[in-house]
Amino acid sequence: MTLSTCLLLATALFAVGIYGLLTRRQAMAVLLCIELMANAANLCFVAFSRFRGGVTGQVFAAFSIALTVAEVAVGLAIVILLYRSRGDTRLDLASEMKE
Amino acid sequence: MSPPILLALVALFAPAVAALLLVPPAARRQGWPAAVVCILGSVVSFGAALALLANQLGDPTPQTLAVPWLHAGTAVVAEAGVHVDGVAASMLAVVTLVALCVQVFSLGYMHDEPAPAFGRYFAYHALFLFSMNVLVVAPNLLQLFVGWELVGVTSYLLIGFYFRKPSAAHAAVKAFWVTKFADMGFLFGLLTLYCASGGFRWDAQLAPETATAVTLLFFLAVVGKSAQFPLHVWLPDAMEGPTPVSALLHAATMVAAGVFLVVRANPLFAQSETTRTLMLGLGAGTALFAALLALVQTDIKKVLAYSTCSQLGYMVAALGAGSVLGGFFHLTTHAFFKALLFLAAGSAIHAVHSNEIGAMGGLAKRMPLTAAAFVIGALSLAGIPGFSGFFSKDLVLEAVEGKLGSVPWAALLATAFLTAFYMGKVVFVAFFGEPSGENAKHAHEPGWSMRGPLVILAILSLVLGYFAAPFAKLHGETYHFEVGLGPILGATLGVGGFAAAYLVFGRGKRETVPAPMAWIGRIANAGIVDRIYELGYRRVTLVFADALAWFDRYVVDGLINLLGYSTLEAGAAARPIQTGLATDYVTAVVVGAVCVAAWAVTR
């Protein structure tokens, strides 16, 4: 296991996340894809920390996880409101975010 | 602080205190108390001025009190204070005495005004006298300018006293605008003087070209204030003010300010032969032109107004010929006899309720004192030997004689004849012969408040000519009267003019403008200059202003409107990008991020 395999894995995760982000219509799926992308970044932090030495990366990863939790909380709240207001969470039906 | 300075300060600030006391409306509304305050201020001012004059006659050393006024950093740009010398002392005495006489006269003349207007009238008078005194005692040209402008404002208030009458309001605005246009010359002259000499002194030494520029600019202001051609147009209109105001503004004070400026700044004017030549020509021309116009007036105040223009022409011509004494002495005698004429005319108008000389007639029997006063003034103005006007006019003629090929001299001699003629006309038509109406038949003398000033001014008009020698001494010059060609010629023309007037008007004829004179009225019509200004205003100023307005509306505003319009259009064009779908926004973010990354990699 080397740094490059870890980075390759992280890139793959990130790419999957982006793909899902752009193609999915369900809010929950989009939220999950964002999680994938965030964890790809966390993986990079940890990998660099492991192979290059130092704990800075790990500290950042811990911060990032905490941040992601907060973000998910907000995201889920939005999804719930979306569901309550229209009984569906498909993003292409919600087009009020203009003007 | 030396006594002369103290006296000058008292003379200066007594009317200012009176004016300040009359600032609260409650003080003015009562009417009579305001008059008392104003006249008390003038009495104190006149007393101090008289004491100052006596002092200067004994010890003519000039004295100055100057305090720093305008600062720029550590340097003092200008000072304010009082300057006492022969010129200031004599002018101060003349101004305060005439103002006092006019104010006392006004007690009777303005008696029928409602109390608030009566109080307002005297408040203006106090302010006016203070303004004039600021000008007279100024230690430098900048303070003189301040007084000059104050006089302009207060004269506006006084001319427009009957402001509910449209013609009076119009006349006040006209006087203000015309003199303000001319004052531009004073302001630019001061700036030029400051740039060239670093100060506002009237005895600065300048390069010849600078001196010419500065004095020409000052002369523009003089032309406006002293009503010389072609800026004389405001003066006849200014007769819309109450008659005592005319006596004050057009005899001793406002119009005299222009001449006073030249007397004051004589060391500057002496440095420019060009300006002096122009003054000589313009003064003599104005004298003759205005005398011709005075000839065809039938309104007694208009006659006096044009004669004021004409006499100011004499003064300007004398100053142009380099005779400060001649110009200033004529200013002094003119101040008294013209104030006398205006007040006597005011007394006649008060009795007859008309300005037209045709409506008067035979007043000498019914108002002997007024008639005597007017006749004394007229004889003095006409330059009849023995009266004060004779001596001063003689000085002017003597100074002008031989200059510029004697053309101005001839013009002034012709003016002397015309002056005697038109004054004779007024005297014979208005005061002798038969009354021409019911009002003239029942005219009677006014009260003592109006007769007293007439008596004082008449006495001065009679005797002032014999005080030419001490007057000359005040200015460091000498004077003695000699019988020669000049005085004999002047006397002959004066007497001849009166005699001619008697032949034409004195024998029962009631026609005020006989046919042979009417053509002068048509040719030298008073309206011509006004019409030229009007034409210039309509054809040049308004057209230019319209062009500028068009440019502003369609080019300047157009550019701004175009900018706003294109912004709106661009916004409308970009609006469809915003779909409101979260997925689209995310796509945009991703595309943007990829672009940034691509740029970072390939850089």
Image (cartoon, coloured by chain):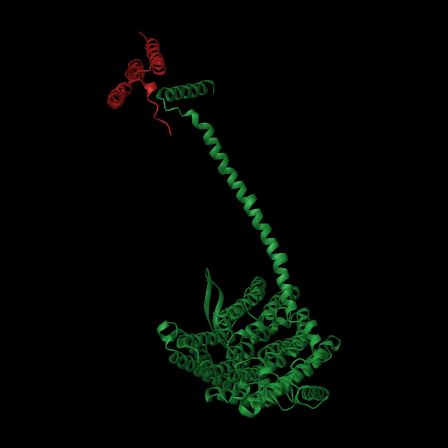
Q: Quadrant of residue A75?
A: top left
Q: Residue furthest right?
A: B405
In the rendered image of the structure, the colour used to display chain A is: red
Give the residue at the far top of this rendering.
Answer: A1
Q: Is residue B57 visible?
A: yes
* In the rendered image, the vertical position of residue B554 relative to residue B538, given as above or below: above
Q: Position of residue B439 (x, y in %)?
A: 53, 85
Q: In which quarter of the image is residue A59?
A: top left
- Left or right: B136 with respect to B591? right
Report the quarter where the N terminus of chain B lies: bottom left
Which is nearer the eye, B68 or B486?
A: B486
In this picture, residue B179 sits left or right of residue B519: left
State the residue in front, B213 or B225.
Answer: B225
Residue at left offset 47%, top offset 18%: B602
Q: Is any atom of residue B204 visible in this view? A: no
- Residue B582, horizontal then vertical, whole percent: 35, 21
| Residue B303 spot, x, y in % from top left | 61, 79
Q: Which of B296 and A98 is in front in this view?
A: B296
B379 or B46: nearer the viewer: B379
> Among the chains, which one is green?
B
**Residue A6 location in percent, x, y?**
32, 10
Q: In this view, does B583 lie to the left or right of B544?
A: left
- Figure label count: 0
Task: Answer with the quarter of the image where residue B306 lies.
Answer: bottom right
